[in-house]
């Protein structure tokens, strides 16, 4: 029996877009530290991106990564397989056939990692041989991705849409019943940093000028506002954090793209609810229900009879200061929201029916042995 008093009980957050940096870049993050950051903040499932070292572009590399996460993660997890510029379509087919991943991530612009695909023939083959394709696509690459999905694809998920102009492209595609069909649906993801941060905040201090660099870059305040309006019109499918940790020393030394996100995403959204910017129902849809549907979590094997008991208890009235009243679990050791005063905090996380976070304490005693791998 758990007495939650006045608090809010909701499904655990499913974060479709994280970079847990393992294997190969584990000085920035690993599955243990990354999943501790998750449970603290109410994220009970993460999907990890393929731009690790080595890249997750062969079945062998995927199985290696799965083994590492299985040993270390204290939350449920899954992977997006990577499309390679060197045409790994045979590997994509193998992975999808084996059911080790259901989605393929491709990079259509330059960002962290060496995974840019520029060859149109490779892009066509990737779309033609995948199920849902997640894209890093900016500006006109969004148009290209929408066309590829229409002509060859079976589903498109546009990651981290930063601006009014780019989100309009995706919304228009979503509303067009030739571009967005049951056979090749279109989904829109927005990150917390493109909702809460902008160039004005970035340019306000020398430190922020370095820390707040990411791909796609932050945009204007008016873009933040458009993103919020679109969210409230129901035109955005998910909030994905694009949790992309780099050490603070790396960030300050030279321009490095990406920043951490899983530890603050839900609290920022609950704070936005307290400011009247969004409903709790919308938060639940964007962060729990839609990710589960898009990733087809509710349809997998045994899970058809219901999902795991992944439950969180949120104190919507708790006031706290980020980075002051809490710990930073991510190995990167910093947050872009340091010193932000928020109202709303996760207080308990239950993963697969077991309390793994309560009253500021993480219980990671099970070493990931009871967590689920989601295909
Ligand atoms: C991400 C990273 O560091 O892995 N960086 C970023 O700026 N968003 C890669 C990505 O998602 O583009
Ligand atoms: Zn990206
Ligand atoms: Zn990313
Ligand atoms: Zn356990």
Image (cartoon, rainbow, N blue to C red):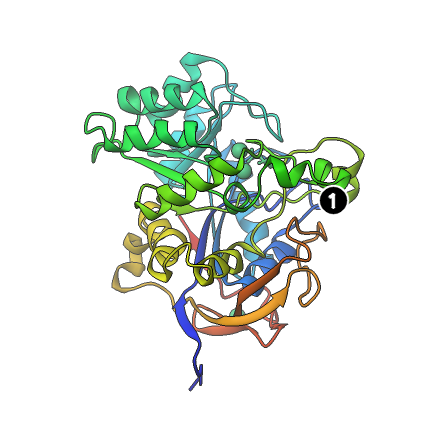
Disc count in the image? 1
Quadrant in the picture for residue 217:
top right
Identify whether 110 is placed above or below 343: above
**Where residue 37 appears, x then y in whole percent?**
60, 59
Q: Secondary structure at mark 1?
A: loop
**Where residue 111 appears, x then y in whole percent?**
59, 28
- Residue 368 seen in the figure: no
Residue at point 46% right, 40% down? 80
Please give left or right for residue 333 compared with residue 375 in the image. right
Point out the image quarter for the N terminus. Answer: bottom left
- Residue 148 seen in the figure: yes
Please give left or right for residue 124 compared with residue 371 in the image. left
Quadrant in the picture for residue 188:
top left
**Front in this rendered view, residue 250 or 222:** 222
**Front in this rendered view, residue 372 or 201:** 201
**Front in this rendered view, residue 12 or 372:** 12
**Where residue 288 appears, x then y in whole percent?**
38, 56
Identify whether 253 is placed above or below 259: above
Q: Residues within 10 Å of mark 1 (few under 14, many from 20)?
A: some
Residue at point 39% right, 55% down? 278
Q: Which residue is mark 1?
A: 247
**Where residue 85 appears, x then y in whole percent?**
52, 20
Residue at point 41% right, 45% down? 228
């Amino acid at each position: 029996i758990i007495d939650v008093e006045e608090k809010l009980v909701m499904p655990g957050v499913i974060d479709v877009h994280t970079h847990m940096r393992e294997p190969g870049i584990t000085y920035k993050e690993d599955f243990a530290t990354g999943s501790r950051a998750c449970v603290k903040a109410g994220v009970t499932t993460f999907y990890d991106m393929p731009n690790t070292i080595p890249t997750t572009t062969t079945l062998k590399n995927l199985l290696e990564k799965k083994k590492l996460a299985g040993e270390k993660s204290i939350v449920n997890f899954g992977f997006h397989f990577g499309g390679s510029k060197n045409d790994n379509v045979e590997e994509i087919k193998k992975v999808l056939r084996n059911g080790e991943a259901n989605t393929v991530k491709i990079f259509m612009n330059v960002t962290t990692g060496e995974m840019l695909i520029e060859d149109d023939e490779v892009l066509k083959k990737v779309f033609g041989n995948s199920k849902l394709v997640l894209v890093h696509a900016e500006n006109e690459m969004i148009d290209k991705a929408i066309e590829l999905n229409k002509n060859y694809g079976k589903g498109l998920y546009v990651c981290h849409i930063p601006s009014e102009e780019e989100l309009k492209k995706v919304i228009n595609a979503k509303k067009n019943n030739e571009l967005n069909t049951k056979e090749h649906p279109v989904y829109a993801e927005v990150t917390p940093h493109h909702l809460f941060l902008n160039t004005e905040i970035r340019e306000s201090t020398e430190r922020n000028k370095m820390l707040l660099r990411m791909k796609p870059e932050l945009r204007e305040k008016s873009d933040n506002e458009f993103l919020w309006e679109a969210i409230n019109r129901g035109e955005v499918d998910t909030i994905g954090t694009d949790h992309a940790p780099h050490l603070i020393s790396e960030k300050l030394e030279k321009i490095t793209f990406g920043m951490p996100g899983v530890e603050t995403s839900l609290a920022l959204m609950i704070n936005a609810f307290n400011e009247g910017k969004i409903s709790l129902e919308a938060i639940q849809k964007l962060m729990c229900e839609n990710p589960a549907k898009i990733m087809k979590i509710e349809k997998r094997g045994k899970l058809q009879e219901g999902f795991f008991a992944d439950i969180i208890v949120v104190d919507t009235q708790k006031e706290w200061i980020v980075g002051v009243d809490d710990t930073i679990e991510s190995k990167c050791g910093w947050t872009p929201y340091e010193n932000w005063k928020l109202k709303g905090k996760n207080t308990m996380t239950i993963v697969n029916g077991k309390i793994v976070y309560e009253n500021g304490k993480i219980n990671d005693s099970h070493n990931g042995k009871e967590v689920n791998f989601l295909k």
